[in-house]
Image (cartoon, rainbow, N blue to C red):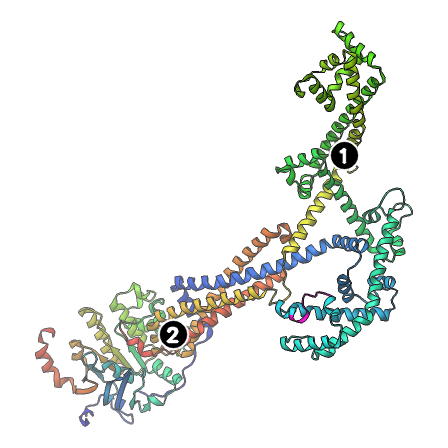
């Protein structure tokens, strides 16, 4: 799979390593009684700093497992994950928490806001974990809520907000500690088309304006339009990896009626 | 863009953890309430047991102090009137205080030196150990060792070296013997017991003699006295009970005299009041007052009835009524005896004349005629006349006596009947005089005082006998209560752990998300233990109040006002603190496992979609 090395690397300047995440022969198997399930059968991939990567694959393809590995949420059976040349397997629990807190932002399909906290409190939770003072956290939190257009609703609790608003709060929260990687797991899976478009816009702007590397699992074709590269996973292996311009026509012809 | 470098994650300050915990509790008030209730139940149980146990102790101490005088009198009563049994002597010897009054008394009765007494005491202590050992055996083991022998007999039967050896061998089988070398120990006991036997007998005989001589001394003089009179009448000329008792070898401390006097006075007056139930009329009065059957009247009813001065006065009036009606009856009997004697002094003819005079002149009222008519009041004469006239006894009219006396023969017959009746009458009069209530010298106030004192003493004795303050066990609890509390706490721990586990399960996604956002395992652990501890504080506080109220109510129910005057405030406050701590520790302990489960949760659970 040498062709994964894309020559047109965005943001590949100077002495910085352009590859932010590198996986080498990543394998994961679960043992359920006597049966061993191979969720990942050896994935080697490089994700480039500042790119917008969409990951696709049917359910059970190992997409989620791959996500967990890349996000530092789970450890592989074999193979390695390097985040900015740091071997995740070498980190202890406290260092992993540090990594998750400051370097990676997570966006979940079901938002996962803490139900008893207001929007602002939800946004400032990661900052509290990072040791930011409350005053600074409040200020930064309001700024992030402003970014997602919810400044006026900072005191609302999740149950008082629509799904789209909740997801926007979740994006603000994921940005709390200025992470360099944003992991999105079906961010618009629970949203209607219009709200989904708004979320897409925000994610894209985060990617472009802040240079955050976005890795996004999705089935939404509009999002595929925004991304730099796409990766298909099937049966725990990379089926195809391609730049968007290589597949646009294909997508356009297949899902033409969905493209506006 | 800068390179990612990885450092250690900082941990959240406790204050923030606390804030987050309180927020979480407020969001899940109902689930928290369950935990609070579980903890409060266990703490309430502990607190109730603690408070009743402490109140019981205080009440017992108080009741013992208040009945001390009465017990002193009882002790002296036993000492002065009943010769000691060997068993009582052994118990007293074992508890003997060297140089105390009892020590001196014993030395006096037995003619013993201090050294001999000390030896007697040592033997008695050893004997006590031996007997307690026998008591600790179960009946089968015991009968295998000493048969049915009890007390001293269990020592006396060890009258040969073979038997001692035999018994010592058996102790090896059953174990628990108080000494390392049973054989030597038993041999020593038996040897010393036999050596001192004669001294003990001398002591017992000395005491018995003292009791007898005191009784004889009290009998002397005009009126027979009891030891109660001896104590209560002090202060009268020439009577010093301390000196009198000392002359018989009883050493009474002078400072005890005042309380003995009061108690003896109470006892005597109480006896007087109680003796009222001997009178038929008074007995039915008390029965009516108490609303019970006449044969069911007890001293308690009487004391209850007269425990106020107003009712005591009413009772005194009743006594006067009874006395005067009894006197009236006696007077009537004496009058008819006099009448009979007048009639007996007359000849048959004279009596017959009374009858004929009356016939010829029915209107005339002679004294003699009235005397004749009065005869039918006597049962024996009435029955005899009924026989003679072939009529029924109740139908006999007074005038018929005159008819019978109308003939000389009838008059002679009647005189015989009078003679028989007159012979029985004096005995009946004497009996009625005997049975008549003595005049009461007690004032209504004194009666009320004695009665209420007696009622209170009875109540205190009841309280004391009902109170089983166990010396053994933990914190004043019996073993059973201790187990109950332990089990209640275990149930509580399981309940809280279950509630917390459910809470953890319910919050899987929240916990996992927190971990994705950078929460450390320790943070998760802390918020769960903290949540449970806070619930423990709340439950503990509620439990303390509920338990203390329940405990106080229970004590109030069983001791009445005694419980209120004996509330050990400081101790109860201390136990409340202990209960609170117990509740918090309990809740925190119960939360450990659920918190650990939560802390170990993988952060990828946050990705899961249900």
Question: Residues in magenta?
Answer: B144-151
Between disc 1 and disc 2, the foreground one is: 1
Q: Taking A185 as reference, is B574 left or right?
A: right
Q: Taking B428 as reference, is B210 left or right?
A: right
**Residue B394: x %, y % from top left:** 66, 20
Q: Quarter-wise, where is residue B20 in the image?
A: bottom left
Residue drawn at the location 61% of the way across and 37% of the way down? B291
Q: What quarter of the picture does the N terminus of chain B occupy?
A: bottom left
**Residue B213: x %, y % from top left:** 87, 53
Residue drawn at the location 63% of the way across and 75% of the way down? B174
Residue drawn at the location 32% of the way across and 84% of the way down? A72
Q: Is residue B148 magenta?
A: yes
The chain holding disc 2 is A
User: How packed is label 2: few (under 14 Cα within 10 Å), some, or many (20 or more)?
Assistant: many
Q: Is residue B248 magenta?
A: no
| Residue occupying the far right of the picture | B238
- Disc 1 target residue: B437
The chain holding disc 1 is B
Circle 2 SS class: helix
Look at the numbered discs 1 and 2 and tell me whether their residues touch, using CB distance below 8 Å. Answer: no
What is the count of numbered marks?
A: 2
Q: Say whether residue A149 is visible.
A: no
**Residue B27: x %, y % from top left:** 38, 64
User: How packed is label 1: few (under 14 Cα within 10 Å), some, or many (20 or more)?
Assistant: many
Circle 1 SS class: loop
A37 up-or-down from B306: above or below: below
Q: What quarter of the picture does the C terminus of chain B occupy?
A: bottom left
- Disc 2 target residue: A137
Looking at the picture, tell me which residue is in the foreground, B401 or B250.
Answer: B401
B210 up-or-down from A153: above or below: above
């Amino acid at each position: 799979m040498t062709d994964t090395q894309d020559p047109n690397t965005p943001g590949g300047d100077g002495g910085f390593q352009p590859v932010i995440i590198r996986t080498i022969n990543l394998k994961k198997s679960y043992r359920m009684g006597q049966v061993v399930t191979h969720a990942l059968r050896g994935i080697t991939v490089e994700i480039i700093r500042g790119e917008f990567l969409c990951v696709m694959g049917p359910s059970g393809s190992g997409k989620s497992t791959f996500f967990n590995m890349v996000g530092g949420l789970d450890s592989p059976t074999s193979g390695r994950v390097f985040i900015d040349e740091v071997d995740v397997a070498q980190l202890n629990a406290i260092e992993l928490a540090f990594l998750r807190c400051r370097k990676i932002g997570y966006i979940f399909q079901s938002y996962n806001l803490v139900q008893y906290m207001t929007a602002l409190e939800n946004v400032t939770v990661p900052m509290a974990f990072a040791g930011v003072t409350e005053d600074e956290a409040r200020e930064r939190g309001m700024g992030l809520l402003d970014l997602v257009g919810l400044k006026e609703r900072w005191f609302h609790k999740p149950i008082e907000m629509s799904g789209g608003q909740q997801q926007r709060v979740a994006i603000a929260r994921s940005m709390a500690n200025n992470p360099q990687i944003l992991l999105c797991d079906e961010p618009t899976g629970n949203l209607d088309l219009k709200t989904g478009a708004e979320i897409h816009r925000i994610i894209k702007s985060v990617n472009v304006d802040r240079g955050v590397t976005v890795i996004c699992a999705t089935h939404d074709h509009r999002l595929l339009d925004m991304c730099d590269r796409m990766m298909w996973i099937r049966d725990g292996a990379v089926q195809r990896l391609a730049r968007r311009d290589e597949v646009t026509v294909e997508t356009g012809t297949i899902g033409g009626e969905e493209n506006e | 863009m800068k390179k990612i470098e990885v450092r250690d994650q900082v941990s959240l300050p406790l204050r923030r953890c606390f804030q987050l915990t309180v927020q979480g509790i407020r969001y899940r008030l109902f689930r928290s309430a369950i935990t609070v209730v579980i903890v409060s139940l266990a703490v309430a149980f502990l607190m109730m047991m603690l408070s009743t146990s402490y109140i019981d102790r205080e009440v017992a101490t108080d009741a013992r102090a208040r009945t001390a005088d009465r017990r002193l009198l009882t002790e002296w009563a036993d000492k002065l009137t009943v010769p000691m049994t060997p068993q009582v002597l052994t118990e007293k010897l074992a508890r003997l205080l060297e140089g105390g009054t009892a020590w001196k008394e014993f030395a006096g009765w037995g003619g013993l030196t201090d050294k001999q007494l000390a030896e007697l005491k040592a033997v008695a202590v050893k004997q006590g150990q031996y007997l307690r050992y026998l008591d600790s055996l179960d009946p089968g083991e015991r009968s295998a060792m000493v048969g049915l022998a009890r007390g001293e007999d269990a020592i006396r039967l060890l009258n040969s070296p073979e038997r001692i050896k035999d018994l010592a061998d058996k102790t090896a089988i059953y174990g628990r013997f108080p000494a390392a070398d049973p054989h030597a120990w038993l041999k020593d006991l038996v040897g010393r017991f036999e050596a001192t036997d004669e001294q003990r007998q001398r002591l017992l005989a000395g005491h018995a003699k003292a009791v007898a001589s005191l009784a004889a001394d009290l009998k002397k003089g005009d009126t027979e006295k009891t030891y109660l009179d001896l104590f209560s009448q002090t202060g009268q000329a020439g009577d010093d009970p301390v000196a009198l008792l000392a002359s018989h070898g009883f050493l009474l401390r002078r400072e005890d005299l005042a309380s003995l006097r009061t108690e003896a006075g109470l006892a005597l007056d109480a006896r007087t009041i109680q003796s009222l139930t001997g009178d038929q009329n008074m007995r039915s009065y008390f029965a009516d007052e108490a609303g019970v059957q006449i044969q069911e009247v007890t001293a308690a009813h009487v004391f209850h009835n007269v425990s106020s001065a107003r009712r005591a006065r009413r009772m005194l009036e009743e006594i006067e009524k009874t006395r005067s009606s009894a006197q009236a009856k006696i007077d009537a009997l004496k009058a008819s005896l006099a009448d009979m004697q007048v009639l007996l002094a007359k000849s048959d003819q004279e009596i017959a004349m009374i009858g004929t005079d009356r016939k010829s002149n029915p209107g005339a009222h002679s004294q003699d005629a009235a005397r004749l008519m009065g005869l039918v009041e006597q049962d024996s004469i009435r029955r005899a006349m009924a026989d003679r006239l072939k009529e029924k006894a109740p139908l006999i009219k007074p005038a018929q006596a005159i008819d019978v006396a109308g003939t000389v023969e009838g008059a002679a017959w009647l005189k015989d009947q009078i003679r028989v009746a007159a012979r029985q009458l004096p005995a009946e009069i004497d009996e009625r005089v005997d049975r008549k209530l003595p005049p009461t010298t007690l004032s209504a106030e004194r009666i009320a005082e004695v009665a209420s004192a007696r009622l209170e003493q009875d109540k205190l004795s009841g309280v004391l006998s009902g109170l089983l303050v166990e010396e053994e066990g933990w914190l004043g609890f019996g073993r059973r209560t201790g187990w109950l509390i332990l089990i209640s706490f275990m149930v509580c721990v399981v309940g809280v752990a279950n509630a917390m586990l459910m809470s953890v399960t319910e919050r899987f996604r929240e916990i996992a998300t927190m971990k994705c956002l950078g929460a450390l395992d320790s943070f998760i652990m802390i918020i769960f233990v903290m949540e449970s501890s806070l619930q423990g504080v709340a439950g503990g506080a509620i439990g303390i109040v509920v338990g203390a109220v329940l405990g106080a109510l229970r004590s109030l129910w069983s001791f009445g006002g005694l419980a209120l005057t004996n509330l050990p405030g400081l101790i109860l406050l201390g136990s409340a603190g202990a209960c609170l701590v117990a509740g918090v520790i309990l809740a925190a302990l119960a939360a450990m496992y659920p918190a650990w489960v939560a802390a170990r949760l993988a952060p990828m659970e946050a990705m899961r979609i249900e």
